[in-house]
Amino acid sequence: MTSPRVNTNSLKAVYGDGAMSYDELWHPVIRPPALALIRALGLENASRVLDVGTGALTAPLRAVAPRAVIVSVDASAAMLHVARAHAQATACLADASRLPFPRASVDAVLLAYVLFHLLDPGAGAHEAARVLRSGGSAGTVTWASETQPNAATVWDDTLGEFGVPTLPDHGNHTGLDTEDHVRALLATNGLTPTRAWREPIEHAFTPEIYLRLRSGGGSSRARLARVDAHTAGAAIAEARQRLRALDPSDFVFRGEVICTISHKPS
């Protein structure tokens, strides 16, 4: 299943210079469902676990798998740098579609918020199945829905008024936004789905934290980098004034994710 909407240049830009902001400001928003998945994976006796596409989950993985070697795998050197600095992660620079590990060499693979960033999500699932030992487990988190706060419209409109260009899409949720879709993807690529469920997300930002998130990381930071410093600064200053005029309810992000657990057949 190819995802032509995933622009690799945009993906690199989004998870490059904004890695610290992502870890500090955005990851806490989306972290709870990943923690629920980690607890459900049953990793007490695991000896090697791959955390693919993050590194921010190293500490909770260590807590539930105290005897395991946890390896954080990411295609972004900046994200891995943060993982090393904040969690002393064992880091591996690699693509989720081409994992540099031998066949049947790990007990579990975690793919939290990863598959929709791949040109071919099926390749990521196939690689997870390849490196898993018989009976090993794989966990995934994908988006079912997102409702951006009203503040997002104000932010995007402001940047547009200052001529800040948009970016090509760096994610594609098509085919990953229902339990049946994810189960089918996993089953087609060598895994046996055993559980799928939904987890809600709701997070209220403050105006200043929201401004820091949007100006300091993700697609907005990459967009601002495409204009001169004066224009970027003026756009941020105007956005700050407009955001301060909003109500607290305008800063509430809501979403729902799909968590799945699957196993490699024995």
Image (cartoon, rainbow, N blue to C red):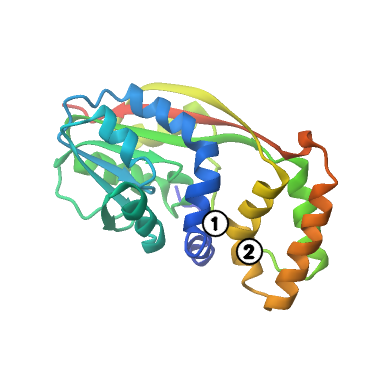
- Based on the displayed image, in which of its 4 quarters is residue 167 positioned? bottom right
Mark 1 element type: loop
Tag 1 near tag 2, CB within 8 Å? yes
At a point 61% along the width and 34% down the height, the residue shown is 145
**Number of marks drawn:** 2
Q: Name the residue under label 1.
A: 170
Residue type marked 2: Leu
Q: Is residue 80 above or below residue 58?
A: below
Seen at 26% across and 23% down, the residue is: 42
Mark 2 is surrounded, within 10 Å at the Cα level, by few (under 14), some (14 to 19) or many (20 or more) other residues, namely some
Quarter of the figure that contains the C terminus: top left
Residue at the location (30% across, 51% down)? 73
Quadrant for residue 100, please give it.
bottom left
Q: Position of residue 171 (x, y in %)?
A: 54, 51
Residue 251 place in picture, x, y as percent: 73, 39
Left or right: residue 96 compared with residue 161: left
Q: Position of residue 248 (x, y in %)?
A: 77, 36
Q: Around disc 1, counting alpha carbons within 10 Å, would you say few (fewer than 14), some (14 to 19), or many (20 or more)?
A: many
The image quarter containing residue 168 is bottom right
Disc 2 secondary structure class: loop
Q: Where is residue 141 in the image (x, y as percent from the top left)?
A: 45, 35
Is 205 left or right of 244, judged from the image as shown?
left
* Residue 43: mark in rendering: none
Measured along the vertical axis of the image, is residue 244 above or below residue 57? below
The Cα–Cα distance between marks 1 and 2, rounded to whole angstroms, is 8 Å
User: Can residue 51 be seen from the camera position used here?
Assistant: yes
Which residue is drawn at the image coordinates 31% and 43% (left, top)? Answer: 51
Amino acid type at mark 1: His
Where residue 167 is drawn, which disc sits there? 2
